[in-house]
Amino acid sequence: MYVSMQDHSGSFVNLLPMVSSNLQKCRGTRKLSTASLALSFFFFLGFMGLQNMHSLFFNCGDSAAENFTLQQQQRQRQPTMDDGAKEAGAAAPLPMIGTIQNQQSEEDADCAGRYIYMYDLPPQFNRKIAEECTGNPAWIRLCEDLSNMGLGKQFILDSNDSLSNLLLPYDAWYKSNQYSLDIVYHERLKRYPCLTDDPEKAVFSYIPFYSALDFGQNMLDTTMSARDRLSQRLVGWLQNNLHWARTGGKNHMLLIGRIAQDHGRKEFEDQWGNCLLSLTELENVTKVVVDRFWWRDDQIAMPYPTSFHPYSDDQIVSWQQTILDNARRELPVLFVGGPRNDKFFSGSLRNKLMQQCLNSSRCTLLRCDIVDCEKNPQRLTHAFLKSVFCLQPPGDSPTRKGIFDCMVSGCIPVIFDPHSISDQYTVHLPMNVSSFSVLLDGQAAHDGELDVMEELSRIPATTIATMQRTINALIPNILYKRYDSNQTTRDAFDITLEALFNRFTRASTNSSEIPLQL
């Protein structure tokens, strides 16, 4: 076994745990005495002082040294720059030493307390998943949905289309899939100005695993091992990483662009989903998901992606003005969805609400089993923009992408499960959910004891106007701007990062540093 010492003469702190581990294992396998162990250790210290010493050999037969070498090679790679950018970038003249120091000082001042370390995972955990987007029966339009850095295909409206003069600015609208945030966040974090290749300098570490895309490609597989394979391989890769071994996953973030339910199956149970969230090796990791298990402290919810992805602050203001100009809405109540044939309460409730809507002159039904809602999101946006209230019953989980789709168009969401908003998006939306949404009794509506349309008609016009203004002000909090945006207003991504910084800063303040053990 060989451990290269070249370029590591100043990395004694990083080497020390590995050296100690190997010496202890040598002691265990060859029954070294305590005195021999101490002598070997100080002999190593002497070697560290020899600048012309190129290598050090350990002969215990353990793989830790190879893992160390791999980790050092990973650290030498700069995750803050795309490979294409490296190839395209021309060599710049070297500045004077004083200029370098000034630039470094300014960078440290801007990034103090805001550094993020991004693991350089093998491509099988992210890039290759995205590249293998064809021929998937569970996600037919996957390649199209992942285009434009995960934002999807841009709206292309004919000039004769009535929506062409309404959905402005035209270049801010995309056909974004609800499960594309793995890529959206990864691309934004690649361009984050305070990335560091030193994990000890970072507030937290980001694991760029495309878990939602992995599950989306394997969700129909009947074998548990196929659904769990890549999640388990990720754990194996992390366990061979020195930074992970030192922290045990604390101050780490894993983003999951699907609902927690899709990843919450216990490892050896033959049920829906994969086992990512039940792996004990990841219990210290903070998970960011679109729909969290609200009773779990290790999860933070982020908004689903909508179709609106602005480039500038002016585009946000322009769209907010469009919403205000359409304050007099012609449709009192709108329900967008399709019938469900499943046996669960959520599916049954949806069918009952559809029937109520059909029976009321105050409600408009847009059926997604007739109109392809995913393929024609511009039609949904137009319908939301004309409606006062939008019914949002739970689907496969309490939350729903439609909640954010309707809000970004100024429609008031009507929810039927208290966990649809209040226990979910606590850092993106106000705690007083009644200021921008209406909560009705889902069980009563299901059992025919509540006339939803009649209940909504009782809400005063002044209350409706106040709720509409609140929603209009909240729009920046729930959208994702384009990755190349010059927008300064915080979006959902920025707010998620702020929540993570606050979480990990509090955790580091409340915990003492892990002592170095020999």
Image (tube, grey):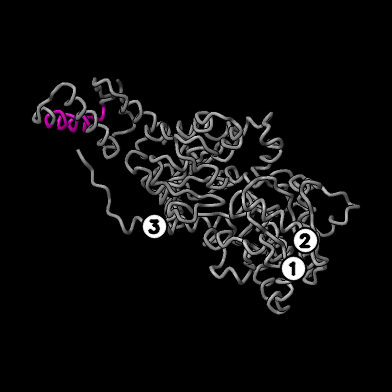
- Percent x, y for residue 350? 69, 54
65 shown above or below 293: above
Q: Between 446 and 492, which is closer to the camera in this rendering?
A: 446
**Residue 245 relative to residue 337: left or right:** left
Mark 3 or mark 1, earlier in chain: 1
Q: Which residue is mark 3?
A: 505
List the residue tagged with mark 1: 453
Q: For the point 62% across and 44% down, which residue is it?
A: 180
User: Residue 254, percent across and down?
Assistant: 48, 45
Choose the circle earlier in sequence order: 2 or 3: 2
Answer whether residue 200 is magenta in the image.
Answer: no
Disc on res. 352: none
Where is residue 33? Give x, y as percent: 9, 27
Q: Main secondary structure of the magenta part?
A: helix
Q: CA distance from mark 3 to mark 1?
A: 47 Å
Check whether the beta carbons of the residues at disc 1 and disc 2 lie within 8 A of each other: yes
Which residue position holds label 2? 357
Give the quadrant of the N terminus: top left
Residue 365: horizontal and vertical position, in percent?
Answer: 79, 57
Residue range of the region highlighted in magenta in the rendering: 38-52
> Between residues 85 and 416, which one lies in front from this camera angle?
416
Q: Amino acid at mark 3?
A: Thr
The amino acid on which the numbered mark 1 sits, given as a three-letter code, is Met
Q: Nearer the viewer, residue 93 or 244?
A: 244
Q: Tell me, yes or no, whether the two marked residues, 3 and 1, touch with CB atoms within 8 Å.
A: no
What residue is rendered at 37% in x and 47% in y?
250
Is 47 one of the magenta-colored residues?
A: yes
The local secondary structure at tag 3 comes to helix
Q: CA distance from mark 1 to mark 2?
A: 8 Å
Q: Amino acid at mark 2?
A: Cys
Quarter of the view holding residue 400:
bottom right
Apparent side of residue 335 relative to residue 343 in the rendered image (left or right): right
